[in-house]
Image (cartoon, grey):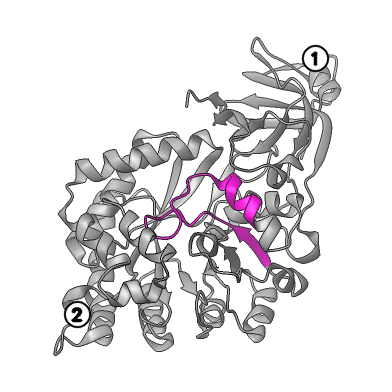
């Protein structure tokens, strides 16, 4: 974790020293699975040396000041310092809102009933198809700023509100532009298999199977070609599919994910939100980076997670937003030795929440995990869910200096407190952000 000079009499000059943190939570040592979840690597009176946007060393204030010097000192003033939060599941880019549907839900309509009546995801699809690129970016930029304000420094972002190639590519373009114009690092996911588009639900249209074949046979190759023209210097985006009643069956999900894997795309899946159809087991068998939602996951699939590197991403804001009473069975996943992460599921229908601190508060109450476990799930394990654990998610030598200062005396205030923003300072690549 540390990188100290062998000769402490000759301190190394660095760009910045952060010192005097009441608690420096390093999360060092890699992805945390099973009973190891919650090892914070806590250093009292902690400090960091930062050089060229990277962490040069982490240690006590005494150690860092013995080995490093800088013309720029940041006094953490007794605050808690954490890695910047990583949000591994968001639908950040969309147009419009679904406030009317929220009112319908609180009046008693179910999520699936609203979908079957032409609302839900398809409602946002109509608004997003009509929106221009500039409008979409502008609306999403405000959400980006709120995420940064609440301490998120890296986030995954899905398409999925186009459900036809032109708008899906427009959403990918919006993600690339937001990533280029904002300090928030965005990891894109192609989610053309988010729902069955309305033009495929009419009688004689071929339904879900016809759309599955379109996604697998035409959209995925077109996305790969487009990516090569517009973002050839970046890894291919993830490909996700919603394996659920009313969306894609297990067999259709397999068709899409196997086609994506054959083209070189990394994989994700939405699974087991309302019914356990086997999507988590499918994700494990295909080597997917993550399986997300996981409320109704069968026991055998939980055991499969424990023997794999597929991250179980819990989305506690979603059942909360739907006023549901069942949440991801975190205890069973931990007992099986699985890798547990948490995310906001930021989206316009069920979880318009840019604040991952709220997800932590919900996870501690309704998933039965401790604040320390929730912090690890929202940092190093969340980074693993999007293939970034080698560069973010912990405060270790060589990693990006992405970190947050919380105006609290003890890390346990995360989860304990909610409905407010505990972040006083957000730093990205060693630069303090004005957000």
Judge left or right: residue 55 versus residue 248: right
Task: Give the position of the N terminus as an image quadrant.
Answer: top right
Residue shown at 48%/57% (left/top)? 345
The tag on residue 10 is 1
Q: Quadrant of residue 225?
A: bottom left
Residue 269 locus on image (x, y percent): 47, 71
**Label 1 residue SS:** loop
Residue positioned most to the top: 71
Judge left or right: residue 36 versus residue 95: right
Q: Examine the rendered structure and indicate whether residue 389 appears above or below residue 6.
A: below
Q: Within the magenta stretch, is there residue 114? A: no
Residue shown at 18%/50% (left/top)? 131
* Front of the two marks 1 and 2: 2
Crowdedness of circle 2 by 10 Å Cα count: few (<14), some, many (20+)?
A: some
Crowdedness of circle 1 by 10 Å Cα count: few (<14), some, many (20+)?
A: few
Residue 31 visible (yes or no):
no
Residue positioned most to the front: 107
Between discs 1 and 2, the one toward the N terminus = 1
Viewer-closest of 232 and 115: 115
Residue 88 locus on image (x, y percent): 52, 55
The tag on residue 180 is none
Q: CA distance from mark 1 to mark 2?
A: 70 Å
Residue shown at 33%/59% (left/top)? 159
Viewer-closest of 14 and 157: 157
Q: Examine the rendered structure and indicate whether residue 246 appears above or below residue 126.
A: below
Residue 365 locus on image (x, y percent): 69, 58
Which region of the structure is painted magenta? 339-362
Residue 383 locus on image (x, y percent): 58, 52
Residue 33 visible (yes or no):
yes
The tag on residue 200 is 2
Q: Quadrant of residue 200?
A: bottom left
């Amino acid at each position: 974790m540390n990188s100290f000079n062998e000769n402490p009499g000759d301190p190394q000059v660095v760009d910045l020293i952060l010192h005097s943190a009441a608690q420096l939570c390093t999360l060092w040592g890699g992805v945390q699975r099973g009973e190891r979840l919650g090892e914070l690597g806590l250093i009292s009176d902690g400090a960091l040396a930062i050089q060229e946007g990277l962490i040069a060393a982490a240690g006590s204030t005494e150690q860092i000041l013995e080995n490093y010097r800088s013309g720029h000192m940041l006094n953490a003033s007794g605050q808690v310092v954490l890695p910047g939060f990583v949000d591994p599941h968001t639908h950040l880019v969309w147009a419009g809102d679904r406030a009317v549907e929220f009112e319908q839900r609180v009046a008693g309509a179910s999520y699936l009933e609203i979908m079957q009546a032409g609302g839900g995801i398809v409602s946002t699809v109509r608004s997003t198809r009509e929106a221009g690129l500039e409008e979409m970016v502008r609306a999403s930029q405000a959400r980006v700023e709120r995420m940064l304000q609440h301490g998120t420094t890296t986030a995954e972002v899905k398409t999925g509100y186009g459900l036809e190639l032109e708008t899906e590519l427009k959403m990918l373009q919006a993600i690339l532009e937001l990533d280029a114009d904002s300090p928030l690092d965005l990891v894109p996911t192609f989610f053309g298999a988010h729902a069955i588009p309305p033009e495929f639900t009419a009688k004689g249209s071929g339904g879900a199977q016809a759309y599955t074949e379109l996604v697998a046979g035409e959209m995925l190759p077109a996305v790969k070609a487009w990516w090569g023209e517009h973002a050839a210097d970046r890894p291919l985006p993830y490909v996700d599919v919603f394996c659920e009643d009313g969306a894609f069956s297990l067999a259709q999900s397999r068709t899409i994910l196997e086609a994506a894997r054959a083209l070189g795309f990394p994989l994700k899946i939405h699974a087991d939100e309302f019914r356990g159809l086997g999507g988590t087991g499918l994700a494990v068998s295909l080597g997917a980076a993550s399986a997300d939602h996981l409320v109704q996951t069968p026991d055998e699939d939980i055991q499969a997670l424990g023997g794999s590197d597929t991250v179980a991403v819990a989305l506690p804001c979603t059942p909360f937003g739907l006023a549901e009473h069942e949440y991801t069975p975190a205890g069973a996943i931990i007992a099986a030795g699985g890798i547990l992460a948490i995310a906001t599921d930021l989206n316009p229908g069920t979880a318009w929440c840019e604040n991952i601190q709220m997800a932590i508060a919900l996870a501690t109450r309704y998933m039965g995990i401790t604040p320390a476990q929730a912090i690890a799930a929202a940092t190093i394990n969340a980074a693993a869910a999007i293939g970034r654990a080698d560069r973010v998610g912990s405060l270790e030598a060589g990693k990006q200096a992405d970190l947050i200062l919380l105006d609290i005396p003890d890390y346990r205030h995360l989860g304990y407190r909610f409905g407010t923003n505990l972040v006083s300072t957000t730093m990205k690549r060693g630069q303090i952000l004005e957000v």
